[in-house]
Amino acid sequence: MIQGPVTSGRHGWAFNRPLIDLAEKGYVEAEFFLTGEAATYALAPGAEFSRDGQWRAQPKGKVPFKTRFLVYRPGDPAKFNGTVVVCWNNVTAGYELFFGESPEVLEEGYAYVCATVQRIGVHGFEANPQGLAAWDPERYGDLSIPTDDTSYDIFSQVARAVGPGRDRSVDPMGGLDVKKVIGLGASQSAGRLATYINAVHPLAPEQGGHAFDGYMLQIYFGSGTPLEASDRPISAAAANIRLPRGDVLIRGDLDVPAMIVNTELEAISCQSTRQPDTERFRTWEAAGLTHVSFQAQLTRNEKYLRDFGVAPPAPSQQINRIYLQPLYDAALHHLNRWVNGGPPPPSQPLIDFDGDGEVIRDKYGLATGGIRLPQVAAPVAVNSSAPVTDDFAGRLRGTNRPFDPATLAALHRDETDYLAKFSQAAAAAVEAGVMSPRDVEPAVAEAAQEYRRAVEIGARQPAPAAG
């Protein structure tokens, strides 16, 4: 059963909603509740969690649930491109993280659905719970997801609630003519999505399968999650948590397109689970980028301040400063074309590793190989996955180290020369299909700021001792 749009609550807005006014972009924002019974799954008799990902699962039981999903959709049906992206909200932090208000989504007419499918999203961690029920008891107090074992089927049910064959008695899509549904998950959600793809997607529709027309796994560490006893979210507060290592492939017999979009950091984890591009599969790896960038952390902090009323610590100026969203947007553009019968995304070079599994770096410290966005192809700093601090959060945020004055001067005569090289590199990225033309102008403007930052930091450095 679907209820909504939901307007109750003490805050007056849905948790983690965009910072921008979607109405100004021609979008409708609406939240809905979904109530029902969700299937849990187990391996079929004789099956195993094999490395090839070709898992055979079957429904095990039913568990009652009530959850929410947040919809962004074009207000004008003529501007809808026919595709709904359903995001598996990330709960690693103990509350939900998602971002659907990107230029690709809003300018190209997608609908975007942010789905609460895991227990932590509703109930939070036991210590200092920040889930939906604690954040706004008036709005979310009767939501319930008893176990993450139901997350896979809840994800299917949200997809069907917004898909082409949906029940329109309460229509979250406002009558839009939906053609395709893409499932998306990032970080811990990508791991759960990998299990969903390998175990649940192949099932018959009445068992929860074949709810999606394509999948995107973002910043994916190459490891799935259990079907049973799967309530194992990683707490960012646990300083001794190590990053996962890849141990499973995306099944090779998948009948819809799937795409992995990774940075240098996840590529390290996925070395042993790399698989070749096929007619149904693509992997992108971007050199110089990492899991969480300075720009993404600023947005996350601003939302945290609005939603919780407390300012989190400002992000370190030393963390990676190459924004991931333009790469995600380019990938989504290709994936949408792909699921609608067009060509697959262009294959891209992968990051280089030595025999010991270490990233090969050039003389400046930048990773070689992989997708090379203009910040890497025309650099003013070393951006990498190497952490500034050795805690869990530090390992995700990587490093930004501006070049010293001598290196900067050797590479670029002045700001004008640098921006000409950066613009040329951006044009090459557009030609390669890993950057959208709309992202070039803001990237060049940011590049000017980064050049000036490098000059300023260099000016503060002590002069080398006289020889």
Image: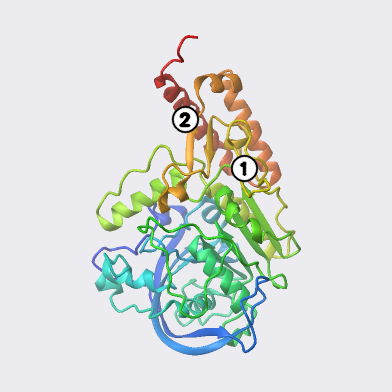
User: Which quadrant, please, contains the N terminus?
Assistant: bottom left
Mark 2–mark 1 Cα distance, whole angstroms, equals 20 Å
Q: Residues within 10 Å of mark 1 (few under 14, many from 20)?
A: some
The answer to whether residue 74 is seen in the rendering is no
* Viewer-closest of 338 and 464: 464
Instruction: From the viewer's perspective, tell me whether residue 356 is left or right of residue 174.
Output: right
Residue type beneath disc 2? Gln
Q: Residue at x 58, y 27 (%)?
A: 419
Tag of residue 262: none
Name the residue beneath numbered marker 2. 449
Q: Is residue 57 above or below residue 289?
A: below
Q: Residue at x 55, y 36 (%)?
A: 441
Picture coordinates of residue 387, whole percent (x, y) = 47, 44
* Viewer-closest of 208 and 112: 208
Quadrant of the rendered structure where residue 423 is? Answer: top right
Tag of residue 437: 1
Picture coordinates of residue 81, whole percent (x, y) = 60, 62
The answer to whether residue 343 is seen in the rendering is yes
* Viewer-closest of 175 and 208: 208
Quadrant of the rendered structure where residue 203 is? Answer: bottom right
Picture coordinates of residue 245, whole percent (x, y) = 56, 60
Q: Residue at x 49, y 90 (%)?
A: 61
Provide the secondary structure element on which disc 1 rests.
Answer: helix
Precedes in sequence: disc 2 or disc 1: 1
Provide the secondary structure element on which disc 2 rests.
Answer: helix
Q: Nearer the viewer, mark 2 or mark 1?
A: 2
